[in-house]
């Protein structure tokens, strides 16, 4: 059970300070936010989001070198 991913709403995810609610909603509209729609809410897979942001950050650091 410890390996289950953490799911939060967009607003809850934004409150963690990882990324703003505005950017999370933009990512969701573009289909780039990992998660699932549950009814009328989008649940963000926070673990995958953090991995995705770390990967994108590392890729940008490689380009700058």
Image (cartoon, grey):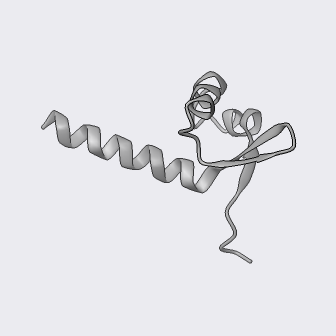
Residue 64 percent location from the top left of the image? 17, 33
Q: Residue placed farthest to the top in the image?
A: 22
- Residue 25, quarter of the rendered image: top right
Please indicate whether residue 40 sits to the left or right of residue 65 in the image. Answer: right
Residue 42 percent location from the top left of the image? 75, 41
Q: Residue at x 67, y 39 (%)?
A: 16
Please indicate whether residue 29 sits to the left or right of residue 58 in the image. Answer: right
- Count of numbered circles in the view: 0
Q: Residue placed farthest to the bottom in the image?
A: 1
Q: Residue at x 62, y 34 (%)?
A: 28
Q: Residue placed farthest to the left in the image?
A: 65
Query: If the image is split into quadrants, where does the N terminus sit?
Result: bottom right
In the depicted structure, whether residue 5 falls above or below residue 1: above
Q: Residue at x 57, y 26 (%)?
A: 23
Residue 47 percent location from the top left of the image? 59, 56
Residue 55 percent location from the top left of the image? 38, 49
Query: If the image is split into quadrants, where does the C terminus sit?
Result: top left
In the depicted structure, whether residue 5 falls above or below residue 36: below
């Amino acid at each position: 059970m410890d390996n289950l991913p953490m799911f939060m709403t967009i607003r809850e995810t934004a409150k963690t300070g990882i990324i703003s609610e505005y950017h999370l909603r933009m990512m969701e509209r573009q289909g780039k936010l990992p998660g699932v729609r549950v009814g009328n809410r989008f649940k963000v897979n926070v673990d995958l989001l953090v991995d995705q942001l770390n990967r994108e950050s590392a890729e940008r650091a490689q380009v700058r070198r």
